[in-house]
Image: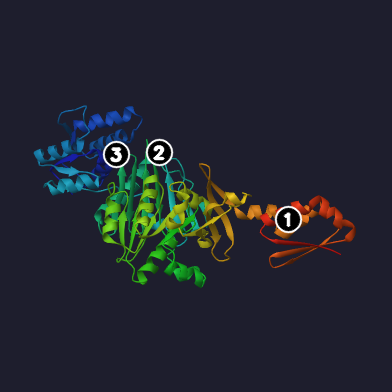
């Protein structure tokens, strides 16, 4: 309680109606000072349509009249109030006043220079923890809309309103202020600030990833709180032994792909822990740092690093594996590729609707010929489970879709790991890179036997065809054999050579 002293009120305490609340609760008495620089800022905000501060000032005036608390205005008004925080601190020091604030940074700075601080918030409209039941993945709050939650598990969730009453800006600002106060209390232990820019704030508080956006970045005030509800180990995915063996011994350039909310980060987290249990040095690159990992695994923040810092640190610290959650920008791809070329095992998390989309996003950054050196394994996640696993190999061949043998060229073959079946081929023709679904061409063309049969039916109405290893035998009735020799033998032999099979035509 501040009683009989001078109290200086900053802008945040007015906006959140903290000063009015403290007066009504009897926690704030004596003389209240508002610096004129704050009035200039309130006027500026009101002229831009933001009336939160002016409503807070009206509330404070009303409370002070009801409880006979004197409000005075001090200091010089200035149009240049970009440094109004320093102006307020300087005034509080000069007046030996108690600073009333709801801004955690201002509170810490004031305390560090010997200013008394009262950092007290009005009660929050609700506690975030109370909204998170076991099956709640995330909470979505936006100005003018009822509060909503995602209920379920990755890949199997539904969006549900938990109240009919729309959220207003005051409630959102107060809820954000409570979360920030708690976060600043535990910074460096159970909380850290990832991004703090005009219009955007992202921070981690215990298990919660909190994203705050406000105009002009977004069209309204929005608060999103995400909590991981699953923590799996690799055994929980019931992967075939050959997949586990590949992850242990052969896979060093791994992409974990899938649409948002399908469990990519959860799988990356389990893979990081698995490599750690194999006595590998594991590090992560994250933005924000929201993977829940053992203390042995160092987590680096991409947003807190400067250009080339992560590159240099990872090269010098020599990890066996680096988990990159997630790859988005061109700089991210460049970093992933550079570290992979340096011989560091890389596991990248990437948004993609299909496995080949993820491969193409990397292929667009490098020559096709080096693609298998960067990515050797693609794991596609769907509804929280491993849906598909692809591997990449290089071969010199005639790519699918081309016919002539002299068009053979280096081709990246994307195979289904479990079946060994080629699914896609990537190759350069001219100056363009082509991605061809192999199955499509096989289905269109059919097997060599079917192609030969279809061709022969154009000329010979009756025959029998047999396939034996790499030889196809055609039994043609005598009455049609001359037609075969005269009209289609040469063409059919050319087709057989192109299909790389031996052909024998036998009269009967």
Count of number-bearing discs: 3
Label 3 vs 2, first from the N-terminus: 3
Query: Where's residue 483, x and y in %?
Result: 85, 53
Q: Are marks 1 and 2 in contact (CB under 8 Å)?
A: no
* SS type, badge 1: helix
Query: Where's residue 104, x and y in %?
Result: 24, 47
Label 3 vs 1, first from the N-terminus: 3
Of residues 383 and 467, which is closer to you in this image?
467
Of residues 111 and 157, which is closer to you in this image?
157
Label 1 vs 2, first from the N-terminus: 2
Of residues 334 and 33, which is closer to you in this image?
334
Circle 2 residue: 218
Query: Where's residue 284, x and y in %?
Result: 34, 58
Residue density around tag 1, few if under 14, some if 14–19, many if 20 or more, within 10 Å? some
475 relative to 225, above or below: below
Residue beneath the point at 54% across and 64% down? 417
User: Splitting the image into 4 quarters, where does residue 20 fall?
Assistant: top left
Give the distance between the C-alpha atoms of the residues marked 3 and 1, in whole angstroms: 86 Å
Image quarter (top left, top right, bottom left or bottom right) of the C terminus: bottom right
Circle 1 residue: 493
Residue beneath the point at 53% across and 57% down? 414
User: Splitting the image into 4 quarters, where does residue 496 fall?
Assistant: bottom right
Residue 284 in view: yes
Circle 3 residue: 15
414 relative to 3, above or below: below
């Amino acid at each position: 309680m501040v009683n009989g002293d001078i109290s200086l009120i900053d802008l945040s305490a007015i906006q959140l109606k903290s000063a009015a609340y403290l007066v009504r609760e009897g926690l704030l008495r004596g003389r209240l000072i508002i610096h004129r620089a704050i009035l200039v800022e309130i006027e500026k905000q009101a002229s831009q349509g933001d009336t939160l501060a002016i409503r807070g000032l009206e509330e404070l005036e009303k409370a002070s009249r009801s409880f006979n608390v004197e409000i005075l205005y001090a200091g010089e008004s200035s149009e240049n109030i970009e440094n109004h925080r320093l102006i307020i601190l300087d005034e509080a020091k000069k007046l030996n006043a108690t600073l009333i604030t709801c801004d955690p940074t201002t509170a810490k700075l004031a305390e560090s220079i010997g200013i008394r601080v009262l950092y007290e918030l009005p009660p929050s409209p609700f506690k975030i923890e109370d909204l998170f039941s076991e099956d709640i993945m995330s909470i979505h709050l936006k100005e003018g809309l009822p509060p909503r939650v995602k209920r379920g598990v990755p890949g199997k969730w539904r969006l549900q309103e938990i109240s009919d009453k729309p959220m207003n800006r005051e409630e959102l600002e107060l809820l954000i202020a409570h979360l920030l106060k708690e976060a600043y209390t535990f910074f460096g232990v159970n909380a850290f600030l990832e991004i703090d820019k005009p219009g955007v704030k992202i921070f981690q508080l215990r298990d919660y990833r909190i994203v705050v956006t406000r105009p002009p970045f977004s069209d309204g005030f929005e608060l999103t709180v995400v909590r991981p509800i699953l923590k799996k180990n690799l055994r929980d995915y019931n992967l075939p032994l050959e997949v586990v063996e590949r992850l242990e011994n052969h896979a060093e350039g791994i992409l974990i792909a899938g649409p948002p909310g399908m469990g990519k980060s959860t799988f990356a987290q389990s893979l990081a822990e698995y490599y750690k249990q194999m006595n590998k040095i594991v590090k992560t690159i994250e933005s924000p740092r929201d993977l829940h990992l053992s203390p042995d695994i160092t987590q680096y923040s991409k947003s807190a690093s400067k250009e080339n810092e992560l590159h240099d640190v990872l090269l010098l610290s020599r990890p066996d594996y680096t988990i990159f959650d997630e790859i988005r920008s061109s700089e991210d791809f460049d970093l992933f590729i550079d570290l992979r070329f340096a011989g560091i095992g890389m596991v990248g998390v990437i948004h993609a609707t299909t496995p080949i989309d993820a491969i193409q996003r990397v292929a667009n950054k490098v020559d096709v010929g080096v693609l298998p050196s960067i990515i050797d394994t693609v794991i596609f996640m769907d509804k929280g489970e491993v849906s598909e696993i692809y591997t990449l190999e290089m071969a010199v061949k005639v790519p699918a879709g081309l016919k002539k043998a002299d068009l053979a060229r280096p081709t990246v073959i994307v195979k289904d790991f479990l079946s060994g079946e080629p699914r896609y081929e990537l190759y350069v023709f001219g100056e363009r890179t082509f991605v061809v679904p192999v199955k499509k061409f096989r289905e269109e063309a059919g097997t060599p036997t079917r192609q030969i049969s279809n061709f022969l039916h154009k000329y010979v109405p009756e025959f029998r065809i047999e396939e034996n290893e790499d030889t196809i035998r055609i039994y043609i009735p005598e009455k049609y054999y001359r037609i075969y020799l005269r009209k289609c033998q040469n063409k059919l032999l050319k087709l057989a050579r192109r299909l790389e099979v031996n052909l024998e035509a036998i009269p009967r």
